[in-house]
Amino acid sequence: MKTVRIGGVPEHFNYAWYIGLKKNAFKAQGIDLRWVDCPGGTGQMTEALKQNSIDIAIVLTEGIIKAISDGISSKIVQTFVKSPLIWGIHVATKSNYTKVSELKNTQAAISRMGSGSHLMAYLQAQKLGWNTTRELHFKIIKNLEGGVRALTESEADYFLWEKYTTKPLVDSGVFRRIGECPTPWPCFVIAATDSFIKNETFTLKSILETINLITKEFKNIAGIDTILSKRYGQKREDVQAWLAQTEWSQKNIQKETLENVQNKLLELKLISQKLDINQLRALL
């Protein structure tokens, strides 16, 4: 039995992995897949890949591309979710801010440097024509729980996080969502360390084949909206809306997407140079 460590956010996007683990679908392939919760998101996962404390990560597209550009020895092996991620732009319920345009020169809560919340804050600022060098400021808060604390205690002014994950916090009056910012590319990819890709190609292929069978049928699972609603504390109608707009993928990331993301990161001065496509993705 081959032990493999895989990291991901403990959110509804990754429930397909839970299904595979619960049904022993990976063990049937001779793989002891060990799930590692990464509530700190992409920044936590890219650091874990760098430190070799996980072999595989379910990570945001823009975050892993920046991390590879910054030198971590990993590559994208497949797109996981091909639809955009809808980031909610949140303030504390008692905040005086009511429009995203009012947030210029205020403090953004981010989980880590290089995380999705960090990179999307740049993208949002650029859309609004802000000077990203002088009018964008950050408070590192590690995870969603840290974001709640930072906004509630006025340590930061706003926080970008996936809108359905934070919807219960909006409904309960902890956050107020004043805008949305969708990613202009497929949101989640599966990445692996270079050493794992090289030394465990067959194992990696088996993992991808197994999870792809699950995601192909994910929306057809009887009562999946109710299951997700109960597990993640979300309203059934919110889960239904999320399912309606979310599409999984069973293919590797397209060259055009890698070009698009790199062009945007370069424009925002978040990477210093563009990499060759083969430096970013592995064809198994």
Image (cartoon, rainbow, N blue to C red):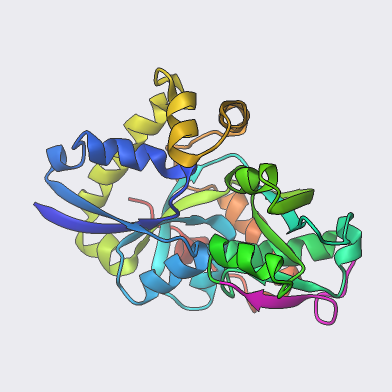
Q: Is 179 located above or below residue 102 in the figure?
A: above
77 to 82, vertically: above or below: below
Spot occupied by residue 71 in the image (x, y as percentages of width and height)? 47, 78
Q: Position of residue 122 (x, y in %)?
A: 74, 67
For residue 211, which quarter of the picture?
A: top left
The residue closer to the viewer here, 157 or 89, is: 157
- Give the answer, above or below, for where 66 lies relative to 1: below
**Could you say which is closer to the camera, residue 174 or residue 37?**
174
Kindly identify the residue that appears in the image at 75 percent across and 69 percent down: 267
> In terms of depth relative to the viewer, which is nearer, 39 or 60?
39
Specify start and end residues of the magenta stretch as a single range.
129-141
* 199 vs 171: above or below: below
Quarter of the view holding residue 218: top left
- Write down the quadrant of residue 231 in the picture: top left
Where does residue 98 sit, x and y in percent of width and height? 89, 54
Q: Is residue 228 left or right of residue 36?
A: right
Residue in the image at 81% along x and 75% along y: 132
Q: Is residue 166 left or right of residue 219?
A: right
Residue 166 horizontal side relative to residue 121, left or right: left
- Picture mark count: 0
Q: Is residue 87 left or right of residue 104?
A: left
Kindly identify the residue that appears in the image at 63 percent across and 29 percent down: 241
Residue at (25% x, 41% y) in the render: 21
Q: Is residue 85 visible?
A: no
In the rendered image, residue 10, in percent from the top left (x then y), is placed at 43, 51
